[in-house]
Image (cartoon, rainbow, N blue to C red):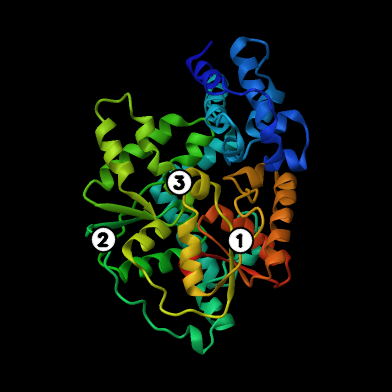
Amino acid sequence: MSGLLEEAKALVAGCDRCGTCLTVCPLFKVRDVERSSARGKNALARGLAEGGLEPGPEVRGAVEFCLLCRACTDACPNKVPTDEAMVRVRQHLTDRAGGPTVTYRLVGAALRSRAAVGLGALALGALRRLGLLRLLPSALVPKEFPRKAFLAAFAGPAALGGEAPAATPGAHARVAYFQGCGMKLMFPDAAEATLKLLGGLGEVSAPDNPCCGLPHLAHGMKGTFLELARENIALFEEADVVVTDCASCGGALKHLADHFKDDGAWRDRAAAFSAKVLDLTEFLVRAGYRSPSRGERTFTFHDPCHLARGQGIRRQPRQLLEAAGRFVDMREADTCCGGAGTFHMDHPGTAARILARKASSIEATGAEVVVTACPGCLIQLTRAAEASGGRFKAMHISQVI
């Protein structure tokens, strides 16, 4: 048995097969077969580890068919971390196959290169200014609803509050912004709004950081993930606080220490780095940020999996939105939207069915804007907003507070 399969088997050992995970798994709700659920995937992990299953294409497909959203772990009486087990099984299968698939290899190489991400952002920015983004599939480049359009559509006298009042950003003075690839490529307006918020609270630096490495970790490229992690740890060593407006990046960066616990050279540096990473909403509430005005627009909030379950942040976004307008919580606010990294591109039909359920929850609130804090979710929610025919807009939280 490989070490990775041994680790995966140990992780799922607490599964009592009770089936509680079936009730919360977004995939099981749209494809009710056992292998869609955490219970089925735990059985796959055990079967592979014990030699009862051959790692053929069908098994690999079942292992890849997971959102890694942790809803199952939250609901499980024994808190079995199926997502962590699946990451190890994926790494084992990738190693056994001699590397990731061509698609993941290309995506991983592109995100590994700061130059490639920068050039991609410039190219998309040029297309955006020329109004040519509509020529690209929305699965690749969603239409961003920018803050300027939001103010034009919703601003009334109550929303004209000018600049945010200064607040004390805690005891930390050296604040650095970690910009994820998704924010850089897809949502530059939201990233600019984040920098403006942070700049209103004090000095902020914005190093040219590489990818957080989460896409590589999720698709069996742990070596690249660790290389990127070391680059980021070194790059932000002088900062006291590292703030990110991407829930996926935040979830990955806060857990870097776990991946270096057996590395004597990097263990302490990784732990120090992870300890100073904050989500934007977490930082703003801690720093005492107050919205410049309270408007009349109605918001609802979609909890990104990497924010709610990956970081335990649920209260802060709602607190900020309640101060900025009317807030209405939606049912199943923390259920995955179906984005999940590349899942919405790998399994578009399933992702669309999950998103339709989310769109129904949004529309039931009557909210004009669904807000989130992750570019991956924003891609999905923007698609739902377009399909709604104007019933709601989708925006990043930095654009509305």
Q: CA distance from mark 1 to mark 2?
A: 36 Å
Q: Position of residue 62 (x, y in %)?
A: 68, 29
Q: Tally the numbered discs.
A: 3
Looking at the rendered structure, the secondary structure element under dot 3 is helix
Q: Which mark is residue 170?
A: 2
Say which residue label 3 marks: 311
Looking at the rendered structure, the secondary structure element under dot 2 is loop
User: At 50% from the left edge and 86% from the top edge, which residue is drawn?
Assistant: 158
- The earlier-in-sequence mark between 1 and 3 is 1
User: At 22% from the left edge and 58% from the top edge, which residue is drawn?
Assistant: 171
Tell me if label 1 and label 3 are in contact, CB under 8 Å: no
Name, please, the residue furthest toward the front. 77
Closer-to-camera residue (380/20): 20
Name, please, the residue furthest toward the bottom. 157
Q: Position of residue 298 (x, y in %)?
A: 60, 73
| Residue type for callout 3 | Gln
